[in-house]
Image (spheres, rainbow, N blue to C red):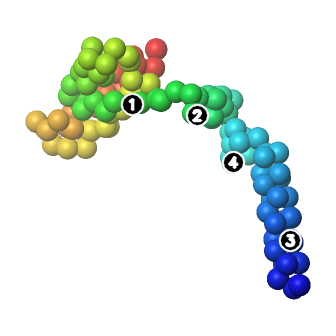
């Protein structure tokens, strides 16, 4: 009899916890003072979940958006996320710190 009561209580507790979790808006940021842009991005991510696949493409600093353009040409769709490094390597490397001004220009261009 004791085990049955315990099982019933655990089941009821599980149901209550599940109902409580469903009542919480999943698109509410954990940061209390999140910017409007952050909230909008989070809502976008939740609204696309299970419906779409967002992909990104990394581009080395010295090639600007070459890899993203390659993806667009061969896949037929623009990657949703543009990625690059800020450049920390020595001159002559694909990740050279000397490319930083170009990196900033390219990221601004991608944003527009």
Residue underneath mark 2? 49
Give me the disc on residue 93. Answer: none
Instruction: Find residue 97 and report its horizontal and vertical position in percent.
Output: 23, 38
Q: Nearer the viewer, mark 4 or mark 1?
A: 1
> Which quadrant is home to the N terminus?
bottom right
Q: CA distance from mark 3 to mark 4?
A: 33 Å
Q: Residue furthest front?
A: 1
Give me the disc on residue 56. Answer: 1
Q: CA distance from mark 4 to mark 2?
A: 19 Å
Mark 3 in CB contact with mark 2 (< 8 angstroms) = no
Taking the spot 56% from the left edge, 28% from the top edge, the residue there is: 51
Which quadrant of the figure has residue 100?
Answer: top left
Instruction: Find residue 91 and report its horizontal and vertical position in percent.
Output: 13, 38
Residue underneath mark 4? 30
Sequence-wise first label, 4 or 2 = 4
Label 2 residue SS: loop
Q: CA distance from mark 4 to mark 1?
A: 25 Å
Residue underneath mark 3? 8
27 vs 7, left or right, is: left
| Residue 26 visible (yes or no) | yes
Q: CA distance from mark 3 to mark 2?
A: 34 Å
Q: Residue furthest left?
A: 92
Q: CA distance from mark 1 to mark 2?
A: 16 Å
Taking the spot 81% from the left edge, 74% from the top edge, the residue there is: 7
């Amino acid at each position: 009899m004791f085990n049955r009561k315990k099982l019933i209580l655990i089941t009821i507790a599980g149901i209550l916890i599940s109902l409580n979790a469903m009542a919480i808006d999943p698109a509410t940021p954990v940061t209390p003072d999140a910017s409007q842009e952050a909230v909008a991005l989070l809502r976008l991510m939740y609204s696309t979940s299970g419906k779409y696949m967002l992909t990104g493409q990394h581009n080395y600093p010295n090639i600007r958006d070459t890899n993203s353009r390659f993806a667009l040409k061969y896949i037929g769709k623009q990657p949703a996320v543009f990625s690059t490094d800020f450049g920390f390597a020595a001159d002559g490397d694909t990740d050279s710190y000397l490319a930083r001004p170009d990196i900033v220009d390219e990221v601004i261009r991608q944003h527009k």
